[in-house]
């Protein structure tokens, strides 16, 4: 069964650009091997990630990610069956948090600061849909 899982977590204070690069490289390699796709966003010190794939596999990958000391305070924001993948071209795409993306972040957020913890599942879906439609610059 194909599912998507969306969660937020707080980046640890010590996180640097090399950590983000390492996370992305490992994610792309590991996810490609098990058929997981998705996107990762880091803004305002908060990670927002959507994982897509087989239910058992997505659970396994998520549990491994939870053990990573580069983030804490994880919270599952949305989980459910999907008919098709959103990020079929991305084993793990990084959504740039450059100033030009701020508008899209804020469009779906109740707060002036990007705060995925407070976003509803439907806002999150709108946010990720817009990213896929090309409104956001991608890295990786
Ligand atoms: C916010 C965040 C997102 C991550 N996303 C993934 C992911 O999608 N897939 C993955 O394999 N590892 C991901 N990781 C890295 C894992 O926690 C772990 O370091 C990695 O899977 C270990 O890979 P290795 O056993 O090949 O060294 C993520 C880590 C963080 C902090």
Image: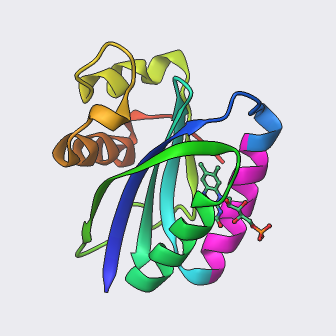
Q: What residue occupies the far top of the structure in this picture? A: 112
Q: Residue at x 48, y 60 (%)?
A: 38
Residue 85 is at least partly visible in this image: no
Q: Is residue 131 magenta?
A: no
Relative vertical location of residue 72 with respect to residue 1 in this rendering, above or below: above
Q: Quadrant of residue 4?
A: bottom left
Residue 107 horizontal side relative to residue 102, left or right: left
Quadrant where ligand 1 appears: bottom right
Residue 35 position (above or below residue 29): below
Front position in the image: 93 or 119: 119
On the question of residue 102 being in view, the answer is yes
Residue furthest right in the image: 18
Q: Characterize the magenta stretch by its predominant secondary structure.
A: helix
| Residue under the image location 22 percent in, 76 percent down | 83
Question: Which picture quadrant has residue 55?
Answer: bottom left
At which x and y percent is residue 91? 57, 65
Residue 85, percent from left and from top: 35, 69
Looking at the image, residue 137 sits to the left or right of residue 83; the answer is right
Q: Residue at x 28, y 33 (%)?
A: 118
Which x, y percent locates residue 59?
46, 75
Residue 137: x %, y % from top left: 51, 34
Residue appearing at x 60%, y 61% in the figure: 65
Q: Nearer the viewer, residue 26 or 115?
A: 115
Q: Report the coloring of the rendering.
A: rainbow
31 drawn magenta:
yes
How many numbered marks does the figure carry? 0
Image quadrant holding the N terminus, namely bottom left
Q: Which residues are magenta?
A: 20-33
24 displayed left or right of 10: right
């Amino acid at each position: 069964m194909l599912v998507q899982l969306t969660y937020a977590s707080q980046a640890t204070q010590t996180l640097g650009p090399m950590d983000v690069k390492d996370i992305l490289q490992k994610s792309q390699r590991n996810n490609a091997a098990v058929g997981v796709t998705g996107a990762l966003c880091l803004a305002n010190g908060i990670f927002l990630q959507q994982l897509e794939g087989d239910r058992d596999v997505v659970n396994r990958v998520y549990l491994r990610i939870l053990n990573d000391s580069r983030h804490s305070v994880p919270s599952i924001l949305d989980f459910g069956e999907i008919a098709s993948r959103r990020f079929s071209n991305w084993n793990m795409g990084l959504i740039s948090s450059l100033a030009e993306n701020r508008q899209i972040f804020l469009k779906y957020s109740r707060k002036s600061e990007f705060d995925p913890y407070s976003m509803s599942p439907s806002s999150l879906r709108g946010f990720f849909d817009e990213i896929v439609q090309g409104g956001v610059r991608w890295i990786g």
